[in-house]
Protein backbone atom coordinates (compact mmCIF):
# COMPACT_ATOMS: atom_id res chain seq x y z
CA UNK A 1 0.00 0.00 0.00
CA UNK A 2 1.29 3.43 -0.91
CA UNK A 3 2.53 5.61 1.95
CA UNK A 4 0.59 8.51 0.43
CA UNK A 5 -3.10 8.18 1.36
CA UNK A 6 -5.69 8.46 -1.36
CA UNK A 7 -7.50 11.13 0.64
CA UNK A 8 -6.17 13.26 3.47
CA UNK A 9 -8.05 15.96 5.37
CA UNK A 10 -6.06 18.27 7.62
CA UNK A 11 -7.76 20.73 9.96
CA UNK A 12 -10.86 21.03 7.79
CA UNK A 13 -13.19 23.76 9.07
CA UNK A 14 -16.61 24.98 8.01
CA UNK A 15 -19.21 27.15 9.69
CA UNK A 16 -22.60 28.40 8.55
CA UNK A 17 -23.05 31.71 10.29
CA UNK A 18 -22.57 31.15 14.01
CA UNK A 19 -22.96 27.37 13.70
CA UNK A 20 -19.63 25.58 13.51
CA UNK A 21 -20.09 22.28 11.65
CA UNK A 22 -16.49 21.21 11.04
CA UNK A 23 -14.00 22.24 13.70
CA UNK A 24 -10.70 20.83 12.48
CA UNK A 25 -11.39 17.47 10.83
CA UNK A 26 -8.29 15.30 10.36
CA UNK A 27 -8.66 12.05 8.43
CA UNK A 28 -6.59 9.77 6.21
CA UNK A 29 -8.07 7.19 3.85
CA UNK A 30 -5.50 4.64 2.60
CA UNK A 31 -5.40 3.96 -1.12
CA UNK A 32 -7.53 1.00 -2.15
CA UNK A 33 -9.38 0.81 1.17
CA UNK A 34 -12.96 1.41 2.25
CA UNK A 35 -13.55 4.02 4.95
CA UNK A 36 -16.88 4.43 6.75
CA UNK A 37 -17.66 7.76 8.43
CA UNK A 38 -20.13 7.64 11.31
CA UNK A 39 -21.83 10.34 13.32
CA UNK A 40 -25.18 11.62 14.46
CA UNK A 41 -27.47 13.81 12.39
CA UNK A 42 -25.93 17.23 11.89
CA UNK A 43 -22.47 16.07 12.93
CA UNK A 44 -20.86 17.17 9.67
CA UNK A 45 -20.52 13.91 7.73
CA UNK A 46 -22.20 15.13 4.55
CA UNK A 47 -20.58 18.57 4.79
CA UNK A 48 -17.17 16.88 4.90
CA UNK A 49 -17.86 14.97 1.69
CA UNK A 50 -19.33 18.05 -0.03
CA UNK A 51 -16.17 19.99 0.82
CA UNK A 52 -14.03 17.28 -0.79
CA UNK A 53 -16.20 17.27 -3.92
CA UNK A 54 -16.05 21.04 -4.21
CA UNK A 55 -19.78 21.48 -3.63
CA UNK A 56 -19.07 23.54 -0.49
CA UNK A 57 -16.11 25.86 0.04
CA UNK A 58 -14.39 25.09 3.39
CA UNK A 59 -13.38 27.95 5.66
CA UNK A 60 -9.97 26.46 6.35
CA UNK A 61 -7.81 23.37 6.37
CA UNK A 62 -6.44 21.26 3.56
CA UNK A 63 -7.90 18.59 1.28
CA UNK A 64 -5.42 16.31 -0.46
CA UNK A 65 -6.12 13.65 -3.07
CA UNK A 66 -3.10 11.52 -4.02
CA UNK A 67 -0.96 13.93 -2.00
CA UNK A 68 -2.06 16.98 -4.01
CA UNK A 69 -3.57 19.93 -2.16
CA UNK A 70 -6.74 20.71 -4.12
CA UNK A 71 -6.80 24.37 -3.13
CA UNK A 72 -3.26 24.88 -4.48
CA UNK A 73 -4.00 23.38 -7.89
CA UNK A 74 -4.93 25.45 -10.95
CA UNK A 75 -8.63 25.18 -11.72
CA UNK A 76 -8.18 22.82 -14.67
CA UNK A 77 -5.95 20.45 -12.70
CA UNK A 78 -8.33 20.48 -9.73
CA UNK A 79 -11.22 19.66 -12.06
CA UNK A 80 -9.22 16.79 -13.56
CA UNK A 81 -8.57 15.33 -10.10
CA UNK A 82 -12.21 15.62 -9.07
CA UNK A 83 -13.29 14.14 -12.40
CA UNK A 84 -11.88 10.81 -11.18
CA UNK A 85 -14.39 10.71 -8.34
CA UNK A 86 -17.84 9.12 -8.26
CA UNK A 87 -20.80 9.70 -5.96
CA UNK A 88 -23.79 7.63 -4.92
CA UNK A 89 -26.22 10.15 -3.46
CA UNK A 90 -28.66 9.41 -0.68
CA UNK A 91 -31.99 8.21 -2.15
CA UNK A 92 -30.30 7.76 -5.54
CA UNK A 93 -31.05 11.26 -6.89
CA UNK A 94 -31.81 9.95 -10.36
CA UNK A 95 -33.05 12.35 -13.02
CA UNK A 96 -36.78 11.64 -13.38
CA UNK A 97 -36.91 13.11 -16.89
CA UNK A 98 -34.26 10.74 -18.30
CA UNK A 99 -34.49 6.99 -18.96
CA UNK A 100 -32.19 4.70 -17.03
CA UNK A 101 -29.54 4.45 -19.77
CA UNK A 102 -29.15 8.23 -19.91
CA UNK A 103 -28.97 8.41 -16.12
CA UNK A 104 -26.19 5.83 -16.04
CA UNK A 105 -24.16 7.51 -18.79
CA UNK A 106 -25.03 11.09 -17.81
CA UNK A 107 -21.46 12.13 -16.98
CA UNK A 108 -19.97 10.42 -20.01
CA UNK A 109 -22.52 12.08 -22.31
CA UNK A 110 -22.23 15.50 -20.68
CA UNK A 111 -18.44 15.45 -21.11
CA UNK A 112 -18.73 14.02 -24.65
CA UNK A 113 -16.61 11.05 -23.65
CA UNK A 114 -18.94 8.65 -25.41
CA UNK A 115 -21.11 9.07 -28.54
CA UNK A 116 -24.81 8.99 -27.86
CA UNK A 117 -25.29 6.00 -30.16
CA UNK A 118 -22.95 3.94 -27.95
CA UNK A 119 -24.30 5.10 -24.59
CA UNK A 120 -27.15 2.61 -24.30
CA UNK A 121 -24.82 -0.37 -24.81
CA UNK A 122 -22.39 1.12 -22.29
CA UNK A 123 -25.23 1.54 -19.79
CA UNK A 124 -26.28 -2.10 -20.27
CA UNK A 125 -22.69 -3.18 -19.64
CA UNK A 126 -22.48 -1.22 -16.38
CA UNK A 127 -25.96 -2.25 -15.24
CA UNK A 128 -24.88 -5.89 -15.58
CA UNK A 129 -22.19 -5.19 -12.99
CA UNK A 130 -24.88 -4.30 -10.45
CA UNK A 131 -27.14 -7.22 -11.28
CA UNK A 132 -29.60 -5.59 -13.67
CA UNK A 133 -30.51 -6.76 -17.18
CA UNK A 134 -30.40 -4.70 -20.40
CA UNK A 135 -34.20 -4.37 -20.40
CA UNK A 136 -33.85 -1.91 -17.50
CA UNK A 137 -32.13 0.59 -19.82
CA UNK A 138 -35.39 1.87 -21.27
CA UNK A 139 -37.30 2.15 -18.00
CA UNK A 140 -37.90 5.46 -16.23
CA UNK A 141 -36.81 6.04 -12.62
CA UNK A 142 -40.46 6.13 -11.49
CA UNK A 143 -40.85 2.55 -12.76
CA UNK A 144 -38.07 1.23 -10.52
CA UNK A 145 -38.35 -0.24 -7.04
CA UNK A 146 -36.27 1.27 -4.26
CA UNK A 147 -33.62 -1.43 -4.58
CA UNK A 148 -33.44 -1.02 -8.35
CA UNK A 149 -33.08 2.74 -8.00
CA UNK A 150 -30.12 2.22 -5.67
CA UNK A 151 -28.50 -0.16 -8.15
CA UNK A 152 -29.03 2.24 -11.06
CA UNK A 153 -27.54 5.04 -8.95
CA UNK A 154 -24.58 2.79 -8.16
CA UNK A 155 -24.15 2.07 -11.87
CA UNK A 156 -24.13 5.81 -12.59
CA UNK A 157 -21.50 6.34 -9.86
CA UNK A 158 -19.10 3.82 -11.42
CA UNK A 159 -19.83 4.29 -15.15
CA UNK A 160 -16.87 6.62 -15.71
CA UNK A 161 -14.44 4.31 -13.89
CA UNK A 162 -13.62 6.53 -10.87
CA UNK A 163 -10.79 5.71 -8.48
CA UNK A 164 -12.39 7.47 -5.49
CA UNK A 165 -16.08 6.84 -4.79
CA UNK A 166 -18.32 8.38 -2.14
CA UNK A 167 -21.47 6.69 -0.84
CA UNK A 168 -24.02 8.74 1.12
CA UNK A 169 -26.28 6.49 3.21
CA UNK A 170 -26.35 3.76 0.52
CA UNK A 171 -28.86 1.53 2.36
CA UNK A 172 -31.35 4.18 3.52
CA UNK A 173 -34.95 3.08 2.98
CA UNK A 174 -34.10 -0.52 2.09
CA UNK A 175 -35.18 -3.70 3.86
CA UNK A 176 -32.39 -5.70 5.56
CA UNK A 177 -32.01 -8.20 2.71
CA UNK A 178 -31.83 -5.57 -0.04
CA UNK A 179 -29.45 -3.54 2.13
CA UNK A 180 -27.14 -6.55 2.31
CA UNK A 181 -27.41 -6.97 -1.48
CA UNK A 182 -26.45 -3.32 -2.08
CA UNK A 183 -23.55 -3.61 0.36
CA UNK A 184 -22.29 -6.68 -1.46
CA UNK A 185 -22.49 -4.89 -4.80
CA UNK A 186 -20.59 -1.91 -3.39
CA UNK A 187 -17.81 -4.18 -2.14
CA UNK A 188 -17.67 -6.00 -5.49
CA UNK A 189 -17.60 -2.94 -7.75
CA UNK A 190 -15.07 -1.07 -5.60
CA UNK A 191 -12.78 -4.10 -5.66
CA UNK A 192 -13.28 -4.57 -9.42
CA UNK A 193 -12.32 -0.96 -10.08
CA UNK A 194 -9.44 -1.01 -7.63
CA UNK A 195 -10.98 2.14 -6.18
CA UNK A 196 -10.96 3.78 -2.76
CA UNK A 197 -14.35 4.16 -1.06
CA UNK A 198 -15.65 6.62 1.52
CA UNK A 199 -19.13 5.90 2.89
CA UNK A 200 -21.47 7.76 5.22
CA UNK A 201 -23.93 5.56 7.06
CA UNK A 202 -26.00 5.17 10.22
CA UNK A 203 -26.41 1.43 9.54
CA UNK A 204 -23.94 -0.48 11.71
CA UNK A 205 -24.46 -3.77 9.91
CA UNK A 206 -23.74 -1.99 6.63
CA UNK A 207 -20.68 -0.26 8.08
CA UNK A 208 -19.17 -3.58 9.11
CA UNK A 209 -19.95 -5.18 5.75
CA UNK A 210 -18.47 -2.48 3.52
CA UNK A 211 -15.81 -0.87 5.69
CA UNK A 212 -12.17 -1.78 6.21
CA UNK A 213 -11.75 1.26 8.44
CA UNK A 214 -14.18 3.48 10.32
CA UNK A 215 -14.07 6.99 11.72
CA UNK A 216 -16.51 8.82 13.94
CA UNK A 217 -17.17 12.54 13.76
CA UNK A 218 -18.60 14.25 16.84
CA UNK A 219 -19.01 17.97 17.44
CA UNK A 220 -17.11 18.77 14.26
CA UNK A 221 -14.05 16.61 14.90
CA UNK A 222 -12.92 13.05 14.29
CA UNK A 223 -12.94 11.44 17.75
CA UNK A 224 -11.96 7.90 16.74
CA UNK A 225 -10.60 5.87 13.85
CA UNK A 226 -10.08 2.14 13.77
CA UNK A 227 -11.07 -1.11 12.08
CA UNK A 228 -14.74 -1.28 11.09
CA UNK A 229 -15.03 -4.71 12.71
CA UNK A 230 -14.35 -3.05 16.09
CA UNK A 231 -17.51 -0.94 15.95
CA UNK A 232 -19.50 -1.51 19.11
CA UNK A 233 -16.44 -2.84 20.89
CA UNK A 234 -13.92 -0.09 20.24
CA UNK A 235 -13.18 0.97 23.81
CA UNK A 236 -14.25 4.51 22.95
CA UNK A 237 -17.50 5.28 24.85
CA UNK A 238 -18.77 7.68 22.17
CA UNK A 239 -18.29 5.15 19.39
CA UNK A 240 -19.63 2.21 21.35
CA UNK A 241 -22.78 4.07 22.42
CA UNK A 242 -23.46 5.14 18.85
CA UNK A 243 -22.73 1.72 17.36
CA UNK A 244 -24.92 -0.07 19.90
CA UNK A 245 -27.71 2.49 19.69
CA UNK A 246 -27.75 2.96 23.45
CA UNK A 247 -29.82 5.74 24.98
CA UNK A 248 -27.53 6.24 27.96
CA UNK A 249 -23.97 7.41 27.48
CA UNK A 250 -21.75 10.41 26.77
CA UNK A 251 -23.76 11.38 23.67
CA UNK A 252 -26.86 13.23 24.75
CA UNK A 253 -29.69 14.66 22.67
CA UNK A 254 -31.64 17.79 23.45
CA UNK A 255 -35.29 16.82 23.58
CA UNK A 256 -38.21 19.19 24.02
CA UNK A 257 -40.52 18.22 26.83
Image (cartoon, rainbow, N blue to C red):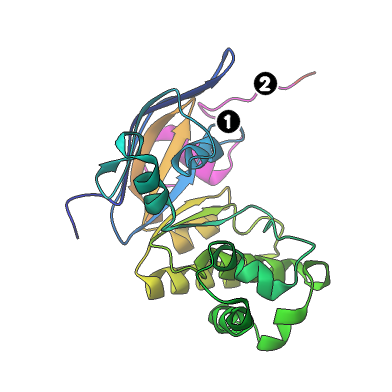
The answer to which quarter of the image holds residue 174 is bottom right
- Dividing the image into 4 quarters, which one contains the C terminus? top right
In the rendered view, does 48 fall on the left or right side of 99?
A: left
Residue 247 located within the stretch drawn in magenta: yes
In the rendered view, does 26 fall on the left or right side of 160?
A: left
Q: Is residue 123 above or below residue 50?
A: below
From this viewpoint, which residue is outermost toward the top?
18
Q: Gap between marks 2 and 1, in whole Å?
A: 13 Å
Foreground label between 2 and 1: 2
Q: Front-most of 109 and 67?
A: 109
Q: Front-most of 29 and 218?
A: 29
The answer to which quarter of the image holds residue 182 is bottom right
Give how far across and how far down residue 40 sits, in percent.
Answer: 57, 36
What residue do we see at 59% from left, 73% from top?
A: 181
- Dividing the image into 4 quarters, which one contains the N terminus? bottom left
Q: Tell me the element at label 2.
A: loop
What residue do we see at 60% from left, 70% from top?
A: 105
Q: Is residue 182 above or below residue 44?
A: below
What residue do we see at 52% from left, 70% from top?
A: 159
Instruction: Specify few, some or many for label 2: CA neighbours under 10 Å numbering under 14, 14-19, or 20 or more.
Output: few
Instruction: Specify few, some or many for label 1: CA neighbours under 10 Å numbering under 14, 14-19, or 20 or more.
Output: few
Q: Is residue 58 above or below residue 76?
A: above
Range of magenta residues: 232-255
- Which residue lies under the disc numbered 2? 254
| Magenta-colored segment: predominant secondary structure | loop
From this viewpoint, which residue is outermost toward the left?
3
Give how far across and how far down residue 124 sits, in percent.
Answer: 61, 83
- Which residue lies under the disc numbered 1? 248
Residue 215 located within the stretch drawn in magenta: no
Q: Tell me the element at label 1.
A: loop
Q: Front-most of 95 and 87?
A: 95
Amino acid sequence: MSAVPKLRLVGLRKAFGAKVVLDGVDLEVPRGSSMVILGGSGSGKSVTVKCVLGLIEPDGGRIEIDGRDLAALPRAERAAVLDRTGMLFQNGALFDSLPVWENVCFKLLAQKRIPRRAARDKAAEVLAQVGLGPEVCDLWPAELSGGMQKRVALARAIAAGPDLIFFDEPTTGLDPIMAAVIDGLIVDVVKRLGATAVSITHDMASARRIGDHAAMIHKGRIVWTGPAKALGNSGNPLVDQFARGEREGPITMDLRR
